[in-house]
Image: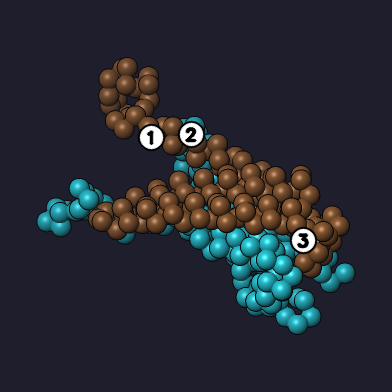
Chain colours: A brown, B cyan
Amino acid sequence: MGNGTRLGRVRGLGSAHEGAGEWWKHKVSAGSNLLLVLWLIVSIALLPGYDYATVAGWIAQPLVAVPLILLVLSVTFHFRHGLQVVIEDYQHDETRFVLIVLLEYFTITVRVLAIFAILKIAFTSTGVAA
Amino acid sequence: MANVRNTARPLSPHLGIYKWGPHMAVSILHRATGSGMATVGTGLFVWWLVALAYGPDAYATFQDVFTLQNGQLNILGYIVGIGMSLSFFQHMASGVRHLFLDAGANFELRSNKRSALTTFAFSILATAIFWVVLLEKAHG
């Protein structure tokens, strides 16, 4: 340590002025991921069956569909940041730029596709809730 | 990009000269499990949801890939299922460990090594419990 001016160290932002914010949001999404993914896998383990009607009926409940959408938002945010860090650490030429752009498209596609599917199941499922 | 490495310059002491320990394994496993879940796990999750959104036929196609005729998981189902659940629990445990490291705690050699080994013990145990629950239910 011992780098930077006193004011700079108090602000704790570094030269780019935004790294700490990115880092913090990554930690916040880690916390929500932990809760939401644990909820998902425990719920899946406790489902009475894995046939179409049971699973679609389960997702169609408001208190399942909404946490699932929150999970999609939290997880996509978290992996978008995490994969960018991995790309930045290992790719040092033009591929870095290309991969980060592809990652951006991948993330947004996944996010919209997953949320649309959840909403479609929720609004069209006639199955009885499990 | 700007920082293409000048190959005439020496590399700083690198991975190759260090003796491997649990702290290094847990670090790279955090990346491997995170990257694996972000790609394979995300693909499976989206496929699962989209198949459900398309209806029973598409969902049956999804299920057929991972199950046998009698509805039990096939080899691929076990590899993917156990791989993803083990990845999740490992990433979760080392993620929690990272929260302590980020706060500046747990850098003493002994406790750092112990917490690294704890993440392995936790992920294996949690995965085993998860699958015992699943299989107990499937087989009555």
User: Where, by quadrant of the figure, is residue B19 drawn?
Assistant: bottom left
Q: Residue at x 55, y 51 (%)?
A: A111
Q: Nearer the viewer, residue B33 or B123?
A: B33
Mark 1: few, some, or many residues within 10 Å (few <14, many ≥20)?
few
Q: CA distance from mark 2 to mark 1?
A: 9 Å
Q: Closer to us: mark 3 or mark 2?
A: 3
Q: Chain of mark 3?
A: A
> In the rendered image of this protein, does residue B98 appear above or below residue B119?
above
Residue A84, percent from left and from top: 40, 49
Report the residue marked by disc 3.
A55
Residue B51 in sight in this render: yes
Pointer 2 and pointer 1 on the same chain: yes
Q: What residue is at 20 percent from the left and 53 percent from the top?
A: B4
What residue is shown at x 37% (from left), y 21% (from top)? Answer: A11
Amino acid of disc 1: Gly
Q: Is residue B95 above or below residue A90?
A: above
Residue B20 placement: quadrant: bottom left
Q: Which mark is residue A24?
A: 2
Q: Residue at x 37, y 53 (%)?
A: A101
Measured from the top left, where is residue A94 in percent x and y?
26, 56
Residues at circles 2 and 1 in contact by the CB criterion of under 8 Å: no
**Where does label 1 land, which residue?**
A19
Label 1's element?
A: helix
* Residue B132 in view, yes or no: no
Q: Chain of mark 2?
A: A
First reached walking from the N terminus: tag 3 or tag 1: 1
| Helix, strand or loop at mark 3 | helix
Please state which of residues A127 and A3 is positioned toward the viewer in this rendering.
A127
Q: Tell me the element at label 2.
A: helix
Q: Are marks 3 and 2 on the same chain?
A: yes
